[in-house]
Image: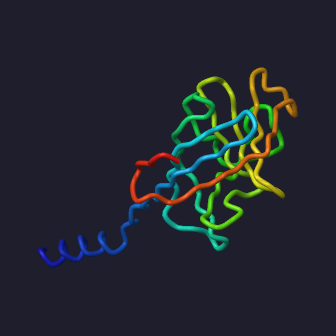
Amino acid sequence: MTNIMISMIGALIVYSTPAVAAQFWCWNLEGEGVSAAGSFVTESSADAEGFYSIIAITGTVNSAAITALQPTDTSIPGNTGYSVDNLIRLTAPQLTKHGLGFAASDGAYHNPFHLDEYRDYVSRPPYADGEGTEPTIQFKANTAPDSHCSTQ
């Protein structure tokens, strides 16, 4: 009986799903009428192109707290048809043409992305499609050893 228990415990250890470790990042963006900084949490493994999936976000944008990450494969309100992928990588360009999405406590939604340059689609109530602003921005993100980001 003891050998059976030891075998079962061994099988559980060998075949159990390992916990996914997280990678912390510090980020900031700045452009006409927009300034934001904070941290990301991504999955620990990158895809074949070096992109990591963002799974959490914190920070501020124009002095408003960032309250939520937009779910992957959905559009921020007021930008229907432009789904975010929430991907980031260390090498330029760090964002894709779909970018990331997040909500702020002032009611605005942001979708920073990279096409020919970095831009941030900003949607404010009443979130009319295509009525948001889209300033050119500077964007930068770096991995961090823990969840603490120093001055950007």
Residue 63 horizontal/vertical position (percent): 58, 29
| Number of numbered tags placed on the structure image | 0
Instruction: Compare residues 28 and 94 and report the one nearer the observer.
Output: 28
* Residue at 40% from the left image edge and 59% from the top image edge: 145
Q: Residue furthest left?
A: 2
Question: Which quadrant: the N terminus?
Answer: bottom left
* Residue at 71% from the left image edge and 51% from the top image edge: 99
Left or right: 101 in relation to 8:
right
* Residue at 65% from the left image edge and 46% from the top image edge: 29
Instruction: Compare residues 29 and 151 and report the one nearer the observer.
Output: 151
Residue 24 horizontal/vertical position (percent): 47, 55
Left or right: 2 in relation to 145:
left
Using the rendered view, name the quadrant where residue 18 is placed: bottom left
Compared to residue 66, the image places residue 71 above or below, namely below
Instruction: Compare residues 2 and 68 and report the one nearer the observer.
Output: 68
Residue 31 horizontal/vertical position (percent): 73, 41
* Residue at 64% from the left image edge and 67% from the top image edge: 91
Left or right: 87 in relation to 65:
right
Coloring scheme used: rainbow
Using the rendered view, name the quadrant where residue 90 is placed: bottom right
Q: Residue furthest right?
A: 130
Q: Residue furthest top?
A: 126
Using the rendered view, name the quadrant where residue 96 is placed: bottom right
Residue 105 horizontal/vertical position (percent): 59, 26
